[in-house]
Image (cartoon, rainbow, N blue to C red):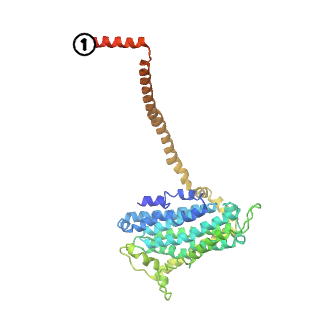
């Protein structure tokens, strides 16, 4: 079942289809590839949590695959130039966080991040569609820059989505991502190394999303002279405003206990309480010190802020630094920018051999055996028909000969008996 979920929810090694699916219409990307369809795998695991909880080895596999997917997709997203491809790999990375949460038994945190991610990622996909519309179908962020003054509504809503996805409080993504990181560290099924993987993924997310903001909306304009950016119509901006509001307040129904205790009248994690009847409790769960949770929360936010500031420094203050860094990394950068050559490996070792094998099966079995069998049968029937037709020629002498032969044969048979 988990292998099925890896294909449906784009996890290692079955994630390559999702970035290619971004070639479709942007509203489809926002709805299906960010908010609904790709989350079906994680939803299935959460709904079947009692089954998975009695398989600890499977749970560990889920957590490891989710963490590695989050890191791998985030690293690829740091090197892409297509605005929708960056968001696509971001989706793969965020799905990895959800699987990481499910793998450590934090099923409610996985569903919580599924919900908040739907808000800010759908916002960013629709925002990218607004940018593409304003740029006359241009998707390369190297040909953008300084769009904030031309697209004020798109820019402001995109900022809200950016703050949510990098996990800045009090935006929606902060609460769900912090819950995942905390459970990765604290859960009996978790481990400090899983928390470290999640924290590194959070830093990379903050870096490549800030990179996207800098190259698209901030800094100097690199827009070609024949393109005149303009704000999108209300039909496109009103959904951005609605999703921007949800990206801010959508996480407030899942405020962790450590924060709700210091806020008078705060009901706590409403979302977790709502899911309690469907979620199997983690065995051997222990109480943790609030100071430890506050510390890890502060560390994750600090890491995200530092990564965002580094990206801002690289792509706004010192735009030559990324080029120098890419040149110094050499083959490593080229490997990441080419998506670790996973597509090429699939083609070389799976797709092309399968195609060649299929061609061989088609040539030797379909063409040279099945088709020839049908030809042989057709030729046999045709020959038999020609022979029978030749006996019905209408020639009286030929019929007399047949009668004579028949009489001779009948008499011979009688005499032989």
Q: Residue at x 53, y 48 (%)?
A: 347
Q: Residue at x 76, y 60 (%)?
A: 226
Query: Which quarter of the image is occupied by the N terminus?
Result: bottom left
Say which of 112 and 260 sits in front. Answer: 112
Within 10 angstroms of label 1, few (less than 14), some, or many (20 or more) residues? Answer: few
- Most distant residue in the bottom direction: 264
Residue 338 coordinates in the image, percent (x, y): 59, 55
Is residue 105 left or right of 342 when viewed as pictured?
left
Query: Which quarter of the image is occupied by the C terminus?
Result: top left
Say which of 257 and 367 sits in front. Answer: 367
Residue 350 coordinates in the image, percent (x, y): 49, 48
Is residue 62 left or right of 318 when viewed as pictured?
left
Q: Is residue 211 visible?
A: no
- Most distant residue in the right direction: 225
Say which of 322 and 246 sits in front. Answer: 246
Residue 409 coordinates in the image, percent (x, y): 30, 13
In terms of secondary structure, where does tag 1 sit?
helix
Q: Residue 170's quadrant in the figure? A: bottom right
Residue linked to disc 1: 414
Say which of 132 and 55 sits in front. Answer: 132
Q: Is residue 365 above or below residue 49?
A: above
């Amino acid at each position: 079942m988990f292998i099925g979920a890896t294909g449906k929810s784009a996890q290692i090694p079955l994630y390559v289809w999702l970035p290619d699916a971004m070639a479709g219409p942007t509203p489809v990307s926002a709805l299906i590839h960010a908010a609904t369809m790709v989350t079906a795998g994680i939803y299935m695991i959460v709904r079947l949590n009692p089954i998975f909880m009695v398989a600890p080895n499977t749970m560990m596999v889920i957590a490891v695959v989710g963490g590695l997917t989050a890191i791998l997709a985030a690293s690829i997203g740091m090197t892409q130039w297509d605005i929708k491809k960056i968001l696509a790999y971001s989706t793969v990375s965020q799905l990895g966080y959800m699987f990481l949460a499910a793998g450590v038994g934090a099923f409610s945190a996985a569903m919580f991040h599924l919900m908040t991610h739907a808000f800010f990622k759908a916002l960013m996909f629709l925002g990218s569609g607004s940018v593409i519309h304003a740029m006359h179908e241009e998707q390369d962020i190297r040909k953008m820059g300084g769009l904030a003054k031309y697209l004020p509504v798109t820019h402001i809503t995109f900022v809200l989505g950016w703050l949510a996805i990098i996990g800045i409080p009090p935006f929606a993504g902060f609460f769900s991502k912090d819950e995942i990181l905390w459970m990765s560290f604290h859960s009996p099924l978790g481990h400090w190394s899983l928390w470290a993987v999640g924290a590194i993924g959070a830093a990379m997310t903050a870096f490549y999303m800030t990179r996207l903001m800098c190259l698209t909306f901030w800094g100097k304009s690199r827009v070609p002279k024949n393109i005149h950016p303009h704000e999108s119509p209300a039909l496109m901006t009103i959904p951005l405003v609605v999703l921007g509001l949800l990206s801010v307040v959508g996480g407030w129904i899942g405020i962790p206990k450590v924060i709700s205790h210091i806020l008078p009248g705060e009901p706590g994690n409403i979302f977790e309480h709502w899911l309690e009847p469907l979620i199997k409790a983690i065995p051997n769960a222990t109480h943790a010190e609030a100071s430890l949770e506050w510390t890890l929360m502060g560390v994750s936010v600090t890491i995200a802020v530092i990564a965002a500031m580094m990206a801002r420094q690289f792509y706004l203050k010192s735009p030559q630094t990324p080029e120098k860094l890419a040149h110094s990394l050499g083959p490593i950068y080229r490997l990441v920018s080419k998506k670790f050559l996973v597509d090429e490996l699939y083609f070389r070792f799976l797709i092309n051999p399968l195609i060649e094998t299929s061609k061989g099966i088609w040539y030797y079995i379909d063409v040279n055996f099945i088709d020839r069998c049908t030809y042989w049968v057709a030729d046999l029937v045709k020959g038999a028909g020609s022979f029978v037709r030749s006996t019905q020629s209408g020639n009286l002498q030929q019929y007399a000969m047949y009668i004579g032969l028949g009489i001779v044969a009948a008499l011979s048979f009688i005499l032989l008996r």
